[in-house]
Structure formats: structure tokens, C-alpha cells
Amino acid sequence: MKILKYKKFTGLHIVCKKCNKLIEVSQEVYKGCRHPIDRQRYKAILKQNGVRKTRDLKALEYDNAVKELIGFKDELSNPIQFVTQIPKAETKPELLNDCIMMYSDWLENVDVPFFEQKVRSKEYIRDTVGYVCKLKTYLENIGYKTDKTTIYQVDKNIVNKYFEELYIKSKSIATYNHNIRALKGFYKFLIATKGYDLINPLQYAKLKNEAPNPINVADNDFYKIINCLTEENSIQIYKNGVRKNRYRPYIKEAFELIAYTGMRITEAISIKYSDIILTQSGEIDYIIGVDYKYEKAHNHDKSKPKKIVPIPYSPELADLLKRLDYKNHLGEDRYLIGADENISRESMAKQLSHSFGFYRNKAGITSPIGLKHLRKSFLTKIETQTGLVESLGYQKTKSVIQNNYLVKPEIARAVRGKGFRLFEPDANK
């Protein structure tokens, strides 16, 4: 793998802008990064008064990058000079490749004014830029030399043909919609933020309906999957020969916790023993959950109290907590699931999601259910049995729950079970 020239210099690194990995350590493929040299940038990473300061450098030559790094260091050590610097005139690159790089930098808040900055996860930036790069790959496949193609040449007709092809080939509705949103955002950035004289070819593009009829995990299917969770016959073999062990010692309890709390996968496996609330008599009252999706969207600067979701008691949840020996760990800042595992909660969530699909197939279940559908099962049962699903705060509005989570056939069965009828019997008969 070819990389930018690198010699060890304090604070100087090389980062891949495609996957956000530092890659200067080795000339070989590093940590799975296989992206070409044109996705690489020199990056300054310094510490100033205990605070990490970073900047993507413009230079593509080692000596110039070192000079730029030293200049950045001088700016940090002289805050007055740093503030009063005369801003450089902003240029508008025309090449498609340069526009994509500029968009990637903007997503990372590089040279973005403080009051315009927005917190975005590395995964979001990686995926968004990746979707934009798919358009670039399409252009290359139909004969364009993208290193010479300008953004003005990628007109509405080309983009329309790209999405016509994607519409047919895309097996996942969500993936298709992600492509639409990413390209919309890319053109909106160029037009509204950077002032390019372009027409947004996706201005009126419509998304596919992702969930017209939500599905859930049937009780029998859930028990079948739980009973399949054994270490034996748990190796998944991919078409390319890669083998992965889908079993983990904590997997059964993890699936159950997700099912019995109704939280999203990462939210459920982030619950700790300190989140268990007891009644005055010492019995389980409820569990404190945190709505991470809301936090990322509306409280990324941690300026507000966390949005708490009180997870209600159920016999299944109480039994699970007993098996997890909650009484001997009450109040501990320790995860209920995989507390001793050296893995992030996000990575564990992906691992569990893949494992659920594997064990679903192993159990012979043909329904296209995933781990996320356990949340739909939970919220549907809360609604049919108590009618309090909105009040618990699992979603921001009831319309979101109604349209995306409640499984309508289950609602119909619950109505029937309650003895619903339209009219009283005719007394005259």
C-alpha cells in the first residue's frame, strides 16, 4: 500500500480520510485500511494545556507538512496572533475529487467557525463520504476520468441514471435512502454553504418507504433463537471463506436484555447495575435507560439533563437480573452485559446484531427479523396490554411509535381478546 512520505516528527501523522485511521505506522495494509493515497492527508495532533488540538494540513509533501505543523504550533502558543490572523481567501475547487475532500473536511469541522460546528460521529462521517464516493465509482465505471471531472459535469441526467440503476440493484431500502440523503447533503453543502452555482439534482428526489408495515419477533421464534445459543455449530462461513465465531458467553443474556427492556441495542447493553432502582421494600422497581439517539441529536454538548427512559418491571426482566446476580452488584458502575470484555459498546452491538441473524437462520426461521425488531415487539406489547407506550418516553412522539413500531396485526388481536364488538345484541330478538 502506497502512503504519503513519512518520518517520525512529534505531532505529525498521516490519516486516511476515508476511514479515519492513522496509517503512517507501516507501509503494509494497516488496521484494515486499503484506501489509495489520494484519500490520505497529513494531520497535526498536538496537546495545548492538556487539550488535544488537531488540524488537517494542506501540504502533500513531507517538508511542507512539517513547516505547516510548526506554524500551527506557533499559533497555539500565541493565542493573540492566532485570533488576529488575516483569513485566507476561500477558493472553490471545481474537480469532483476535491469537492468530496472538501465536504469530508467540513463534516469533520475542519476550518468551520465554532458556532457552525456540529458534532458527528466518525461512523457517520465515514458512511456519508462513502455514499458520495459511490457516485464517483459509478462515473469511473461508465468511462469518466474522475481526477479530471468537474462538479459541473455531474449534471442531473447523470445523477438520475445513477439512481435509476441503484433503485433496481439495491436490495435494502434503507441503503438506497442513505445514498439519497448523502448526495442531497453533499449538493446542499456545495450550493448553500459554499455558494456554488449549481442545481441540486436531488432536490425533489423521493425516499423509498422504509417501514410501511412494521414486523416483530414472534414469541415462538424468540424462544427458538434463545434455545439455539450454544457454542457448538456457531461458526459462520462466508462466501469468500472467512470464518467467524458468532458465539459469545454473554450472548443469551444480551438478547434477553434487549428483548425485556425495549431499548435500542447499544442502549440496552450500556445499562449498568447502578441503573437498577428498588422500591422501599427492596424489590425491583424499574431500570433507568438513556435515549442515546435523542442525546446525539439534541444534547451533543451535554448542556441538558440526559433523556431518561424508565424501563418497567416485568417477571422476565426480574428473572434475568437475578441470573446476573444483581443483588451482589447493586450500585456498581459496571455493565450488566460483558463487563469484563475489552470491546466498545458500539462494536458489541454490531457483533450481537450479526450473531442474531446467524442464530435466526440456524433456528430455521424464515421471517426477515433482526435484533432491532425485539424493540418493536416490546413496544407493541406495552401498548396492547397497558396503553401507556407514549407516556414511557421510548420515542419523542406517539406518531413515531404508531408509524414505525406498533405491529398492527398484534393490535387487532389484542382488540379481539378484549371482547370488542360494535353494537350490543338486539334485545328485540
Image (cartoon, rainbow, N blue to C red):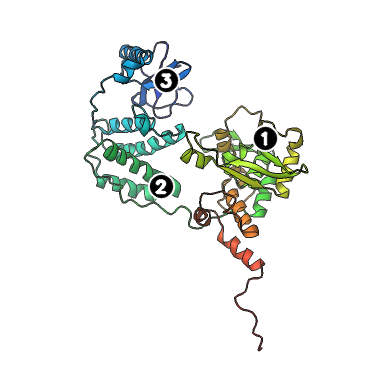
**Camera-nearest label, 2 or 3:** 3
Q: What kind of residue is marked 1?
A: Ser
The quarter in which the C terminus is drawn is: bottom right
Residue designated by label 1: 274
Q: What kind of residue is marked 2?
A: Asn
Q: How crowded is mark 3: few (under 14 residues within 10 Å), some or many (20 or more)?
A: some
Position of 350 with respect to 417 (left or right) is: left
Q: Position of residue 395 (x, y in %)?
A: 53, 49
- Compared with 50, 342 (above or below) is below
Q: How crowded is mark 1: few (under 14 residues within 10 Å), some or many (20 or more)?
A: some
Q: Position of residue 259 (x, y in %)?
A: 64, 47
Circles 3 and 1 in contact, beta carbons < 8 Å = no
Tag 2 secondary structure: helix
Q: Where is residue 59 in the image (x, y as percent from the top left)?
A: 30, 18
Indicate which disc, 3 or 1, sits on the residue closer to the N terminus: 3
Q: How far apart are marks 2 and 3 (CA)?
A: 35 Å
Q: Give me the disc on residue 53.
A: 3
Q: Where is residue 227 in the image (x, y as percent from the top left)?
A: 70, 46
Q: Residues within 10 Å of mark 2 (few under 14, many from 20)?
A: some
Indicate which disc, 2 or 1, sits on the residue closer to the N terminus: 2
Tell me which residue sits at (55%, 38%) in the image.
Answer: 306
**Camera-nearest label, 2 or 1:** 1
| Residue found at the far right of this picture | 281
Q: Is residue 208 visible?
A: yes
